[in-house]
Amino acid sequence: MHNIVPLLLPLEGDTSWPPSAASFNSRPLFPGLGIDWVNNHMMQAVIGALLVIAIWLIFSHRQTVVPGKRQFLGEMAYNLVRNSIGKEILGSEFRPFMPYLVAIISFILVNNLFGELFLFMFPTFSKIGYAYGLALMSWLLYNAVGIKKYGFGHYMKKMTLPDGVPVGLWILIIPLEFISNFVTRPITLALRLFANLFAGHLVIMVFVIGGTMLIESGTLFYAAAGGVSILFSFAIFALELLVGCLQAYIFTVLTAQYVSSAIAEEH
Amino acid sequence: MNDQGQGITVVSLLLAGLLLYGGAGWLLDSWLGTRLFTPFGLILGSALSIYVIVKKMGGVKS
Amino acid sequence: MLLEIGGSINMIGYALATLGPAIGVAWIFASVINGTARQPEARGAMLGTAWIGFAVVEALAIIGIALAFVL
């Protein structure tokens, strides 16, 4: 039974009981070469990015007016993002943002599905640095778009001063709005993605590692409970599949939402 | 602004107000060695956040 | 296997403190759904008020987590 843990949790740093934040530590891929930043989780993210590029290249390769099956599938996936996120939230100005939205939803989706894919079994965004990186890109995007549309001064005024606040309260309200729009927004964006995947993966580790320990305990009753626990971890994997898709969608919707609020006219 | 936008605005304003003024109160407390400013800052922060939210959302006249 | 429970009792307090805001938020949006079902055209006005009520209630939950870490 000793091979269940490496099969179900191959990329974890530490598989001792109880699972903790240390279980999410990365391992350097080439130890001793001075390039310890090339670790297994970073390599997984790179593989995810290459996979996304490959998938969209295959979809868009040799397009025809009457789409074949392959092109039809690609257009369906693209239309889903365009209609339910782009047009719905950004209105008529959705077109320039579509490449970013499609890229980010496919990248997050692929990396979240790695959490349920054999050989990887680790959602990349359960390490918070990767989620911060994505949120930083969205932050740069919506601020750049707002500054480009309104100019720096007008954009800052629009983002930090709501209408109808008396002058005496400005000194209290301006820092509050500044923190709200430029600090808590991107941080909650990253934390939402990270926390869902981190918690889900931690639950999986509890079931898999705990179940293995129960099976190896030698008592028949405990071993049966451990078997049920391993089986139940597959139900959690199914739940994580749902959570992964949902969080990819939500991250993209919120990015579009922030862009939309940065370019929206004051009312 | 649509529903999702309103929800996000409300939550991020509340978090910002409580973090900013509660954090300021906590810093004052650990500097002066008192225990008074943290609750004061938290209440001030939540009051200001709710004020801004009322300003932004309360403009809907039916 | 030695069973041991560690951690801070503050988190139990925070867990208790979330119950009230949870019920409050649920009740607010349940009322909005009810009201929208009865009178769909009043949805905008109801949501505006609901967000303000949501903010007042949610502030309690956020104060709870802040105090759980600070105290």
Image (cartoon, helix red, strand yellow):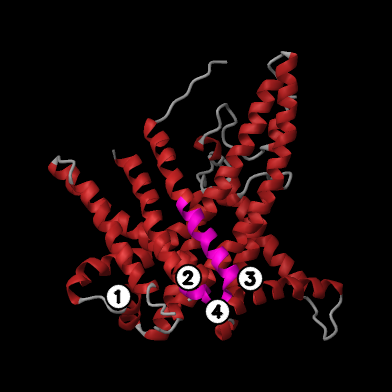
- Residue C35 covered by magenta stretch: yes
The total of numbered circles placed on residues is: 4
A251 vs A128, nearest the viewer:
A251
Q: Are marks 2 and 1 on the same chain?
A: no
**Which of the two residues, B12 or B43, is positioned nearer the viewer here?**
B43
Nearest to viewer (mark 2 / mark 3): 2
Residue type, numbered disc 4: Leu
Q: Which residue is mark 4?
A: A90
Tell me if residue B12 comes above or below residue A90 in the rendering: above
Given the image, on which type of amino acid does mark 1 rest?
A: Leu
Residue at position x 66%, y 48% in the image: A240
Marks 1 & 4 on one chain: yes
Q: Which residue is mark 3?
A: A102
Question: On the rendered structure, is C4 left or right of A112?
Answer: left
Which residue is disc 2 drawn over? C46
Crowding at mark 2 (Cα within 10 Å: few <14, some 14-19, many 20+) = some
Q: Amino acid at mark 2?
A: Met
Q: Position of residue A241 (x, y in %)?
A: 69, 51
Q: Residues within 10 Å of mark 3 (few under 14, many from 20)?
A: many
In this rendering, would C58 be left or right of A225? left
The residue depicted at 73 percent of the width and 16 percent of the height is: A221
**Residue under pointer 1:** A161
